[in-house]
Image: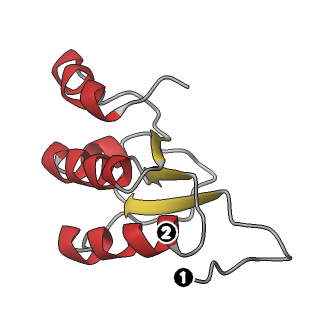
Amino acid sequence: MKKYTLNGENLFEALFLTTVKCNAKCIFCCETGTEEDSPIDEMLKYIDPLVNKLGVKIIDMNGGEPLLRNHRNILQLMEKVNLCGARSSISSNIIALKNDFIKEMKPYVRAK
């Protein structure tokens, strides 16, 4: 299977806009937070091609504030990324981070 490249090198990281909703109210932000979240099934179908065709090594869940999205959805994305052989990360302001979610994420986080 041919790997596609950008400027002769494999892509390293992809950013997933999991939601535009946010709880920080930054004065410089241009997001309105009123758009509907993309369906999880739509998002999941992009992970395998990103990892296995484009060579992406990390998929970052970001937004808005990704932790405002349904936590099951975030875990589904992280699981799929993990199963495809890449790593997932979350760019968050951590205002909405809960200990329970940290425990739920743990199986999908690889230390390396």
Q: Quadrant of the N terminus?
A: bottom right
Q: Residue type at mark 2?
A: Asn
Q: Residue type at mark 1?
A: Met
Image coordinates of residue 8 in percent, x first then y, are 85, 75
* 32 on left or right of 101: right
Image coordinates of residue 17 in percent, x first then y, are 44, 63
Q: State whether residue 70 appears in this view.
A: yes
Q: In the rendered image, which residue does mark 1 sit on?
A: 1
Foreground mark, 1 or 2, reads: 1
Q: Residues within 10 Å of mark 1 (few under 14, many from 20)?
A: few
Quick one: 52 or 34, which is closer to the camera?
Answer: 52
Ranked by sequence position, the earlier of labels 1 and 2 is 1
Name the residue located 22 percent from the left edge and 16 percent from the top edge. Answer: 99
As displayed, is residue 42 above or below residue 19?
A: below
Image coordinates of residue 111 in percent, x first then y, are 48, 23
Q: Secondary structure at mark 1?
A: loop
Q: How is the image coloured?
A: secondary structure
Is the Cβ of the residue at disc 1 closer than 8 Å to that at disc 2? yes
State which quadrant residue 34 falls in: bottom left
**What numbered label is drawn on residue 56?**
none
Name the residue located 56 percent from the left edge and 25 percent from the top edge. Answer: 112
Image coordinates of residue 35 in percent, x first then y, are 31, 74
**What numbered label is drawn on residue 52?**
2
Q: Residue furthest top?
A: 99
Q: Residues within 10 Å of mark 2 (few under 14, many from 20)?
A: some
